[in-house]
Structure formats: C-alpha cells, structure tokens
Image (cartoon, rainbow, N blue to C red):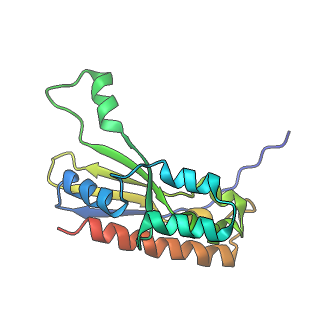
Amino acid sequence: MDKRTIQFTAQRVIYDTSAPVSTVCARLDEELHRSEDGTSVINVMNSSKSREELESGIQGITRGHDFMFFGAIKHHDWLNAWTGNTTNPVPEIHVYTLGNPLIAQTMLRHELATGLHVPPRILVLEKEDRSGTLVVYDLPSSIISPGLSGRVNEELKKAAEGLDEKLERLVTKVTRS
C-alpha cells in the first residue's frame, strides 16, 4: 500500500447578503426545482442507454437552468437536537448538493478524480446576529484542476472555470437583496 498527500491552494467564495436565510433557500429551491422528486436525476443517469437519452432526460429536469437539486442537509436541526438548545437555537445551516451531469462530464473526461468535488456543494448560513445570510462554496477550478498529479491540467481547469461561472451566476441570483 502506498499513500500520497498532494498539497494545493483552494479558494473559498463567500457572498454576504441582507436577504433572510429563508428567502435565499426558497430562491435556491426554485432555481434547482427542489419541489420535484430529487431522485429523478439519479433515475435518468441509471436508466439512460445513450448520450441522447441522457441529454434529453437531464434537459427535461433542468428546464433551461444550469443546475438541479441532488440533496440537502440541515445541520441546524440536528445540532439543536444534540445540544437540547430550544431557547437560543443555532443559526440555520443548509448544505446543498447541486449539479448537472452534462457539466460534470466536461471535467470528468479530463480527470476521473474530479468526481471528488462534482457535484459541487454550497453552504447557506444564517448570520449569527440573524441580519442576513452567507452563501459559501469552494471555487471549483481551485479544487478540481490539480487532479491526482497535483499539477494543473489546463483543459480541466478551463472546464472547471465554466463551472465557476455558472455557480457565480446562480449564487448572485439567489442572494440579491
């Protein structure tokens, strides 16, 4: 057995908005079509027999948007249960997993280890003073492009920068005040 450690620098992006966490989450849910069955993307991915079937199925789910909902975790719910804190609950903490296999393939074809960070996740965090919301994510191109070699793959970086732009567009839209 061999173990390697690759050191690289990542960039964390933080959007700060006065919009309440409930508003940001509602906007994100709408953009990702969260109200629909979240397993539909998995069903399309597992049942498609051709590129055309996959593209058609994914486009049917996204309906012109870049991303779809894969899942979410509400850390504040279990943290409040764990601490028994009912009088002063922790701020809301939502972690969304979102993505699009049609975007993912632009990176996975250059480096299969991209799957470690695709689909991406974003953190929606209520400010402690309840005055607004922080939306946080790690810039995809900064964590994907080193790959397993630790050296930047320029084609992979270019594809990941496309994901950077799409994430920025989404987060800018849902964080408007």
Residue 73 locus on image (x, y percent): 39, 41
Residue 52 locus on image (x, y percent): 63, 71
Q: Is residue 91 above or below residue 156?
A: above
Residue 140 appears in the picture as rendered: no
* Left or right of 140, for residue 66: left
| Depth check, front residue: 46 or 172 | 46
| Depth check, front residue: 82 or 66 | 66
For the C terminus, the quadrant is bottom left
The answer to which image quadrant residue 44 occupies is bottom right
Residue 67 locus on image (x, y percent): 44, 65
Q: Is residue 30 above or below residue 81?
A: below
Residue 19 appears in the picture as rendered: yes
Residue at left offset 64%, top offset 59%? 48
* Left or right of 116, for residue 64: left
* Left or right of 119, for residue 67: left
* Left or right of 128, for residue 41: right
Residue at left offset 61%, top offset 64%? 144
| Depth check, front residue: 12 or 160 | 160
For the N terminus, the quadrant is top right
Q: How many marks?
A: 0
Residue at left offset 67%, top offset 65%? 108
| Depth check, front residue: 40 or 92 | 40
Q: Is residue 102 above or below residue 130?
A: below
